[in-house]
């Protein structure tokens, strides 16, 4: 008979990496007859956006042949205390981490939440845990790519293998750009043309289960919760007194439940009708998915193929149109436009953004952000956003237009920052792209279409129930005046127990006059831009840089003094920079 003795020990590879190994000695008749040297593969999966176990190809691949796995989320305490992210977004993230930890528990594993900066954390973990392999989901955004390049370098120096897979987007964005001659497509039509030439979207990979985990285990200590537990909002410094319950609970479990509810709407998919806008549309829906896609609690590929399968069932195997995936593809388009543009969230130095002479008006910005404009439709939307972290996409259009080209003439960058703080589904690429689009700074030039802050809401919800829900001070106004209460007679205001200018503010601008002036401003800017578009044909952009403009809205459009800075990129031509002064 044989006896086997196993010795575990730490070692160092030729690359200087700490490793765990086993030496197995097989004894027969008191003599060593076999010696096995087995390298133990310890792996880390780094969760960032893809907070899920379904369709997680980088995690699944990292488990192959691995002996141990530790699933890590790195929480930067400095970022938590100083970033422009509000309490609702933090709550959604923490709930998503708690749900992920609960799912890992069912697999006899846990989530390791570690505080610090990735570049400081990983070198320590590589040594302490004797790591051989690191995996994570590909991040297409410029900051993420820069961060990941630094981590890859640290991993290489430590002799750690890195596994990266695309799963936050439907397509490989680098491939789209390659097909477009090395440039991001800047029109949605061009983007659709490019993806029609690509291979079909890859199928989701199987979810991580006990069978997928196999013999891979997670080393856990008795004090895991103290060392690596998910922190509370209070631990992160948030005051939770008076915080209402979450309208959008975070996590993969909730995301998958909502997906099934979403797919139950067979009539919509069968007829492919756009959901009709009404008062109920403005409220958070139990089938809403956008925050779950943003945090990666729901795989966009799973959603894509679930939609496809359902469409084929109800349409008898016919191929679905691209329009079925509209919101997913717009998301993809903005990711593609942003991936190689680190200034995508700024006006200056952004080659695809028209440089507008926006006003700087902190007081007006605060009134808009806090729901104190005096326009009930706008104020109700901003109140819902602050309370719940979500607003309907047409409500987003209304408040974005009001802030920028419609009424206040304030930069889209300021609105983007407010959405970044409050909106659960806001991410860097889609948030910035949407604001440039809605302000006619890029992607969209039909500046003469303006949303009326009175008429648009009235058409959507004639009775004003949405206003009454989020602005209870106006609850007593009849439907006739609830969108323009300043026009209500004194008797109506008294009966409603709300005097305009006392209990609720007067309108901060004259919409008809402000929108007329701003449309004229946009018209002049685009006319000047069109004069030079021929020079820049084939190039990325012909931006305009503003001189100083008056911040007060004048009675009539002022003459425009604009410094035109033409950056011309054309095939076969040298870089050309031209400056003009136009009256």
Image (cartoon, rainbow, N blue to C red):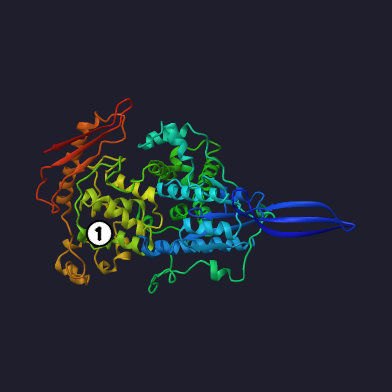
- The residue nearer to you, when weighing 490 against 382, is 382
553 on left or right of 574 = left
202 up-or-down from 380: above or below: above
482 on left or right of 491 = right
310 up-or-down from 117: above or below: above
* Residue 97, image x, y percentages: 51, 62
Determine which residue is flagged by label 1.
Answer: 368
Hey, which residue is sitting farthest top in the picture?
A: 572
User: For the residue labelled by badge 1, is the local secondary structure a helix, a strand or a loop?
Assistant: helix
* Residue 271, image x, y percentages: 46, 42
Q: How many marks?
A: 1
471 up-or-down from 180: above or below: below
Which residue is at a point 42% across and 63% down the rendered structure image? 90
Q: Residues within 10 Å of mark 1 (few under 14, many from 20)?
A: many
* Residue 461, image x, y percentages: 31, 56
Quadrant (top left, top right, bottom left, bottom right) of the N terminus? bottom right
- The residue nearer to you, when weighing 1 against 582, is 1
């Amino acid at each position: 008979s044989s006896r086997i003795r196993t010795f575990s020990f730490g070692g160092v590879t030729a690359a200087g990496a700490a490793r765990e190994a086993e030496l197995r000695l097989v004894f027969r008749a008191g003599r060593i007859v076999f010696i096995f040297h087995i390298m133990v593969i310890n792996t880390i999966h780094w969760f960032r956006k893809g907070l899920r176990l379904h369709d997680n190809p980088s995690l699944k691949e990292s488990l192959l042949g691995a002996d141990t796995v530790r699933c890590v989320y790195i929480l930067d305490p400095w970022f938590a205390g100083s970033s422009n992210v509000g309490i609702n977004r933090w709550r959604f993230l923490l709930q998503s981490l708690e749900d992920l930890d609960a799912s890992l528990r069912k697999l006899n594993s846990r989530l390791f939440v570690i505080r610090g900066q990735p570049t400081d954390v990983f070198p320590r973990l590589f040594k302490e845990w004797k790591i051989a392999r690191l995996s994570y989901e590909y991040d297409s955004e410029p900051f993420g790519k820069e961060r990941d390049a630094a981590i890859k370098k640290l991993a290489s120096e430590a002799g750690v293998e890195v596994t990266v897979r695309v799963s936050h987007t439907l397509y490989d964005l680098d491939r789209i750009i390659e097909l477009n001659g090395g440039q991001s497509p800047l029109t949605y039509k061009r983007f659709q043309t490019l993806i029609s030439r690509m291979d079909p979207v890859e199928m989701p990979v199987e979810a991580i289960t006990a069978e997928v985990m196999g013999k891979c285990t997670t080393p856990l200590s008795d004090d895991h919760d103290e060392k690596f537990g998910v922190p509370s909002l209070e631990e992160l410094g948030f005051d939770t007194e008076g915080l209402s319950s979450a309208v959008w609970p975070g996590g993969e479990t909730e995301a998958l439940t909502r997906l099934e509810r979403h797919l139950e709407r067979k009539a919509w998919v069968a007829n492919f009708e756009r959901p009709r806008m009404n008062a109920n549309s403005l409220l958070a829906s139990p089938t809403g998915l956008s925050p779950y896609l943003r945090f990666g609690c729901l795989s966009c590929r799973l959603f894509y193929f679930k939609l496809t399968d359902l469409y084929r069932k109800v349409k008898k195997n016919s191929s679905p149109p691209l329009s079925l995936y509209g919101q997913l593809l717009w998301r993809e388009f903005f990711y593609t436009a942003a991936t190689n543009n680190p200034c995508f969230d700024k006006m200056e130095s952004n080659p695809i953004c028209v440089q507008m002479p926006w006003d700087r008006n902190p007081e007006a910005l605060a009134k808009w952000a806090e729901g104190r404009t005096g326009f009930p439709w706008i104020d109700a939307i901003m109140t819902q956003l602050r309370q719940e972290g979500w607003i309907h996409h047409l409500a987003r259009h209304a408040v974005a237009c009001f802030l920028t080209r419609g009424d206040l003439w304030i930069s889209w960058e300021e609105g983007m920052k407010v959405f970044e703080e409050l909106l659960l589904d806001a991410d860097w690429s889609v948030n910035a792209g949407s604001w440039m689009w809605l302000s006619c700074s890029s992607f969209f030039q039909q500046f003469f279409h303006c949303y009326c802050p009175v008429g648009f809401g009235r058409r959507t919800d004639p009775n004003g129930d949405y206003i009454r829900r989020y602005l209870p001070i106006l609850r007593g106004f009849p439907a006739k005046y609830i969108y323009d209460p300043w026009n209500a007679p004194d008797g109506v205001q008294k009966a409603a127990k709300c005097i305009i200018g006392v209990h609720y503010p007067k309108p901060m601008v004259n919409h008809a006059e402000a929108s007329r002036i701003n449309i004229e401003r946009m018209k002049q800017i685009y006319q000047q831009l069109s004069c030079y578009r021929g020079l820049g044909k084939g190039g990325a952009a012909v931006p305009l840089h503003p001189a100083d403009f008056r911040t007060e809205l004048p009675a009539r459009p002022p003459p425009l003094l604009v410094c035109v800075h033409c950056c011309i990129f054309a095939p076969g031509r040298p870089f050309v920079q031209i400056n003009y002064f136009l009256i």
